[in-house]
Amino acid sequence: MLRLVPLTFALLLGLPATAGPDGTILVVDGDTFEVGGTTVRLHGIDAPETDQICSDAQRPAWACGEWVRAQTRALFEGQRATCTAMDTDRYGRTVAKCAVRGQDVGERLVGEGLAFAYRQYGMDYDLAEKGAAVNARGLHATGVMSPAAFRAAQRAKARPVIVRNDTGAKTVTVNRGTPQKRSLLPNALNSACKIKGNISISSGERIYHVPGQSYYAETRISVDKGERWFCSEAEARAAGWRKARN
């Protein structure tokens, strides 16, 4: 009797993984896409959760999960992806490697410091992460709790602790001097990100203030309340904030 070989065994035997899904990308978060209507969990990478807050002893807390999602959307939203399915996770998502214009999406995200190599599931992006860490790209420019540790803390109903000022990588620790490349991180970590995203106490409306407006100087950002900084007005509007009237 003919029996189907399970996909995990097929991979171990060196048999080809399943082609597809293919289609236009809709970014859900830093490591999860909708591709042609199929939910895809990118193989071998782990990005901050959308609600994750990052900080260290020298820098203020900031919404790193939202920032990663915004950067990932800027890179890949609306692009056409060709994916190779490798497995199905416990949430029913297709685990796949995807490429856009011939470039490995996972490798690009890890190499830019927007995600970490998920070594528990393979060493595919180990070198890409080390390169990002050495050059202080993206999340490696500041202390960050790994996404896995953040999820564990959330499950335990504990607040994420402040971590030491290291690369944030799971197995990579780099003694850095001055980063050779410009940090892309917002607010205090990037002096170009001066727009304040404030949430109205009375109405809950999301309002952003730009330098020179009447209430800019007195507006304070509370990241733990969902407030944040933006690098451009276009970014603020895309995230659902409107410009202050004064």
Image: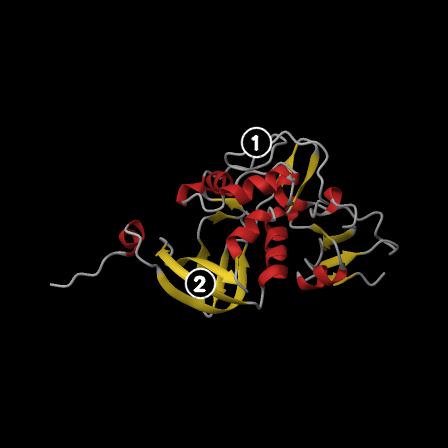
How many marks the image carries: the answer is 2
Which residue has dot 2 on it?
A: 83
Identify residue type, mark 1.
Thr
Q: Quick one: 22 or 139, which is closer to the camera? A: 22
Between the residue at mark 2 and the residue at mark 1, the CA separation in whole angstroms equals 32 Å
Confirm whether residue 196 shows in the render: yes
Residue type of the residue flagged with mark 2: Cys
Looking at the picture, tell me which residue is in the foreground, 194 or 122.
122
Name which residue lies at 64% across and 50% down. 226
Judged from the image, the secondary structure of the residue bearing numbered disc 1 is: loop
Q: Is residue 15 left or right of residue 238?
A: left
Marks 2/1 in contact by CB < 8 Å: the verdict is no
Residue 232: x %, y % from top left: 75, 58
Q: Is residue 13 above or below residue 143?
A: below
Q: For the residue carrying disc 1, how many other residues have a C-alpha within 10 Å: few (<14), some (14-19), or many (20+)?
A: some
Q: Is residue 114 visible?
A: no
SS for dot 2: strand
Residue 61: quarter of image: top right
Figure coloring = secondary structure
Q: Nearer the viewer, residue 4 or 235?
A: 4
The quadrant of the picture occupied by the C terminus is bottom right
Residue placed under numbered mark 1 in the picture: 173
In the depicted structure, whether residue 77 falls above or below residue 212? below
